[in-house]
Image (spheres, rainbow, N blue to C red):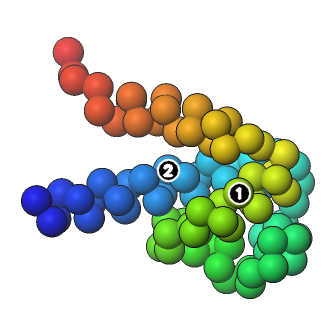
Amino acid sequence: MGRRTTTRARLFRRSLGGVLRQRRLELKLSQEDLAWAVEVTQGSISNYENGRSEVPLSLLLAMCDELQLRPTDVLDRLRPQRQASTAIPA
């Protein structure tokens, strides 16, 4: 059970990071720009986007503000990826 939870958490972090990266690039922001705006290091942004670190909720909310997203928008963008990865093959 522990290994399955770890895998699920890692997949979630990667998916969340991908959503954040995609939106940052849509807005033509660098990792450094976003890091400065939310008061973390560029390396932290890289770790979040690559799923190496879990994004604290308070920071996720700040990132959503800077990326002009509502937290529900992030969840909606995660949903199609989750459905595709859990679909039963035909």
Q: Is residue 49 above or below residue 42?
A: above
The residue under label 2 is which amino acid type?
Ser
Secondary element at image label 2: helix
The residue that label 1 is drawn on is 61
Q: At 59% from the left edge and 62% from the top edge, which residue is drawn?
A: 57
Provide residue 24's location: percent of width, then percent of height. Answer: 78, 54
Q: Nearer the viewer, residue 12 or 27?
A: 12
Secondary element at image label 1: helix
Residue situated furthest top in the rendering: 90
The residue that label 2 is drawn on is 15
Given this view, does label 2 or label 1 mark the residue nearer the observer?
1
Does the CB distance between marks 2 and 1 fall below 8 Å?
A: no
Say whether residue 86 is left or right of residue 12: left
Provide residue 44's location: percent of width, then percent of height. Answer: 65, 79
Query: Which quadrant of the structure image shows residue 2?
Result: bottom left
Q: At 66% from the left edge and 60% from the top edge, which residue is drawn?
A: 60
The residue under label 1 is which amino acid type?
Leu
